[in-house]
Image: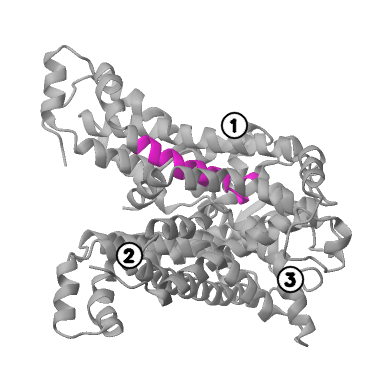
């Protein structure tokens, strides 16, 4: 059967695609011009010739006049923060889910509910007392302060728990007959079976960590710990027209690149992680 | 739900839950307790002593016109973001669900904005709508419109709604698409045999079947608009001009961090916690008896 091309559908979808891509395209174009062209409001719709120097400037000294530091430092900080948060959340969640599913012990359900209710306390809501706790523990201006307070995750624990409940009893029985203890069963059977869940969660949590804003804004005052997302919005300052928009946009492009690349390249796991962690 | 076959170790399970429980107690229960405690205290202007004032902080907040203003801003903002991003997400999902070529390519090109941080989305749109350097901002000014989101509260609100919705469309798109794809083809075929046309078929058959997804997304989008959009407001308007774009979460930050009114800020946090708990409870209550096709 030959199907005629559904032009209206394609047209509207392309419009959506264009609306999503438009601001990124403008940012890319702006990052290839000099400050003067943009400041005069003469930004053309096609790329200019200052691409390399703008990115070099952003990389070594940051973007804009209010830049809190070099993009190279901020990117490194964001990578550390996102990776530690993702791996840390996965590590502590998989362990607690394993304990809750595969063991019977007093207080088991108390622990489960303690983890569960944290779903209801997003960091933005308890931000100032959390800052006070972090500050009294001496965590201000440190990687530990950037990451550990965000590391508890009810969603990851719930996801692993759901998955562990689908592991057949026979598998556990067989392992016990083979004389495997709980730790060997965890490393030899449970961990390999969880591979796709691990990948899916990692993608989601990496983006979550990378895109954090309010917490790093509060817990770091030293520019040595500045992260990309916070740094790039500090570059705008008051939104003055005569800012160095070219290097700011170069920095913005570099901020978006890692998480967008993760979503596009690991799309299958991203979709799985997003859909399943919200169940 | 329990397994039949379990391990019998005594100490090990405690060791396994320990890291998460420690982090949860230190960074969730302790701060939440602190917020509850501080919300009943008033600190003297020099920070030397505090005294217990029952619910005075709450009464002061609820009577404060600036708080009412922030609450109204939040309602307008979340209604705008939710409506805009959900309808755009639904429309795109309904189209991408049709049997067309390049459906997979469209999907990829429509989901990536999820990865853009709210603050960065704000920066991108600021640069486009900037009255002096932005492509659209300048065009509006040229067209004789008094466009300056730094002076006009309504324009500032429209801009943050637009930036926040732009970033959230892909999330809604993805979930609506998953919802649409789980509707059995036979149902839709039966409807078309009965003579229901495209639009009618969508609103009378497909949309009602999507109601669990729609409801779920409604809650998620409200939570997003309430809490995750701090970066958008901070990067774009800082709550201004005046207090035109100050939302509840932004006010918690301004009062606590900038104005150092710990009691008032804590009381606002407590009110927001109640809101989240209510929203989460509604969501879970609903998911418990999820409508199945």
Q: Is there one chain holding both mark 2 and mark 3?
A: yes
Main secondary structure found in the magenta portion: helix
Residue at (19%, 38%) from the top-left corner? A166
Q: Position of residue A157 (x, y in %)?
A: 35, 39
Residue at (65%, 59%) from the top-left corner? A25
Q: Position of residue A250 (x, y in %)?
A: 73, 49
Look at the picture and state if B50 lies above or below B176: above
Q: Chain of mark 3?
A: B
Q: Which mark is residue B282?
A: 2
Residue at (58%, 36%) from the top-left corner? A81
Observer-nearest residue: B175 or A14?
A14
In the picture, residue B136 is in which quadrant? Answer: bottom right
Q: Nearer the viewer, mark 1 or mark 3?
A: 3
Observer-nearest residue: A239 or B233?
A239
Q: Which residue is mark 3?
A: B135
* Total marks placed: 3
Please state the extent of the stretch shown in magenta in the rendering: A197-216
- Judge whether residue B30 can be spotted in this image: no
Q: Which residue is mark 1?
A: A144
Q: Position of residue A84 (x, y in %)?
A: 53, 32
Q: Nearer the viewer, mark 2 or mark 3?
A: 3
How many angstroms separate mark 1 from mark 2 (CA)?
35 Å
Which quadrant of the rendered structure holds the N terminus of chain B? top left
Q: Residues within 10 Å of mark 2 (few under 14, many from 20)?
A: some
Specify the farthest residue to the front. A2
Left or right? Give the position of B96 relative to B46: left
Q: Chain of mark 1?
A: A
Specify the farthest residue to the top. A179
Left or right? Give the position of B125 relative to A265: right
């Amino acid at each position: 059967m030959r199907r005629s091309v559904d032009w209206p559908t394609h047209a509207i979808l392309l419009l959506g695609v264009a609306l999503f891509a438009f601001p990124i395209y403008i940012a890319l174009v702006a990052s290839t011009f000099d400050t003067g062209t943009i400041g005069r409001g003469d930004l053309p719709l096609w790329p200019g010739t200052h691409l390399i120097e703008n990115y070099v400037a952003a990389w070594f000294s940051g973007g804009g006049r209010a830049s809190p530091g070099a993009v190279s430092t901020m990117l490194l900080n964001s990578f550390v923060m996102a990776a530690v948060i993702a791996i840390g959340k996965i590590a502590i969640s998989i362990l607690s889910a394993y304990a809750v599913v595969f063991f019977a012990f007093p207080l088991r359900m108390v622990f489960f509910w303690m983890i569960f209710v944290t779903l209801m306390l997003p960091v933005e809501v308890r931000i100032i007392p959390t800052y006070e706790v972090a500050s009294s523990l001496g965590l201000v201006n440190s990687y530990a302060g950037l990451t550990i307070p965000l590391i508890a995750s009810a969603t990851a624990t719930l996801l692993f728990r759901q998955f562990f409940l689908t592991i057949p009893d026979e598998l556990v029985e067989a392992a016990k007959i083979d004389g495997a203890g709980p730790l060997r069963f965890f490393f030899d059977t449970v961990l390999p079976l969880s591979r796709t869940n691990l990948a899916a969660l990692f993608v989601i949590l990496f983006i979550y960590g990378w895109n954090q804003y309010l917490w790093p804004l509060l817990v770091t005052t030293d520019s040595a710990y500045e992260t990309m997302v916070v740094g790039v919005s500090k570059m705008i300052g008051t939104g003055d027209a005569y800012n160095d928009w070219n290097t700011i946009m170069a920095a913005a492009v570099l901020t978006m690149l890692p998480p967008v690349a993760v979503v596009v390249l690991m799309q299958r796991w991203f979709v799985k992680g997003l859909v399943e962690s919200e169940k | 739900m329990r397994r039949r076959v379990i391990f019998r170790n005594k100490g090990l399970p405690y060791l396994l839950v320990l890291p998460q429980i420690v982090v949860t107690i230190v960074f969730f229960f302790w701060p939440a307790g602190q917020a509850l405690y501080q919300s009943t205290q008033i600190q003297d202007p020099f920070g030397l002593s505090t005294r217990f004032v029952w619910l005075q902080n709450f009464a002061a907040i609820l009577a404060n016109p600036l708080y009412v203003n922030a609450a109204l801003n939040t309602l307008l903002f979340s209604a705008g973001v939710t409506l805009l991003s959900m309808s755009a997400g639904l429309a795109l999902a309904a189209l991408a669900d049709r049997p067309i070529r390049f459906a997979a390519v469209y999907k990829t090109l429509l989901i990536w904005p999820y990865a853009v941080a709210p603050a960065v989305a704000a920066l991108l749109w600021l640069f486009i709508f900037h009255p002096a350097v932005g492509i659209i901002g300048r065009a509006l000014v040229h067209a004789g419109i008094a466009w300056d989101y730094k002076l006009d509260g309504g324009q500032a609100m429209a801009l943050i709604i637009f930036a926040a919705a732009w970033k959230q469309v892909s999330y809604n798109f993805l979930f609506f698409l998953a919802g649409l794809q789980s509707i059995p083809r036979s149902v839709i075929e039966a409807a078309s045999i009965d003579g229901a046309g495209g639009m009618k078929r969508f609103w009378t058959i497909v949309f009602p079947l999507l109601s669990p997804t729609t409801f779920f997304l409604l809650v998620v989008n409200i939570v997003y608009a309430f809490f995750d959009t701090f970066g958008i407001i901070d990067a774009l308007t800082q709550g201004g001009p005046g207090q035109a774009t100050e939302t509840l979460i932004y006010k918690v930050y301004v009062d606590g961090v900038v104005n150092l009114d710990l009691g008032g800020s804590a009381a606002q946090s407590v009110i927001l916690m109640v809101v989240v708990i209510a929203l989460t409870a509604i969501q879970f209550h609903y998911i418990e008896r999820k409508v199945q096709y």
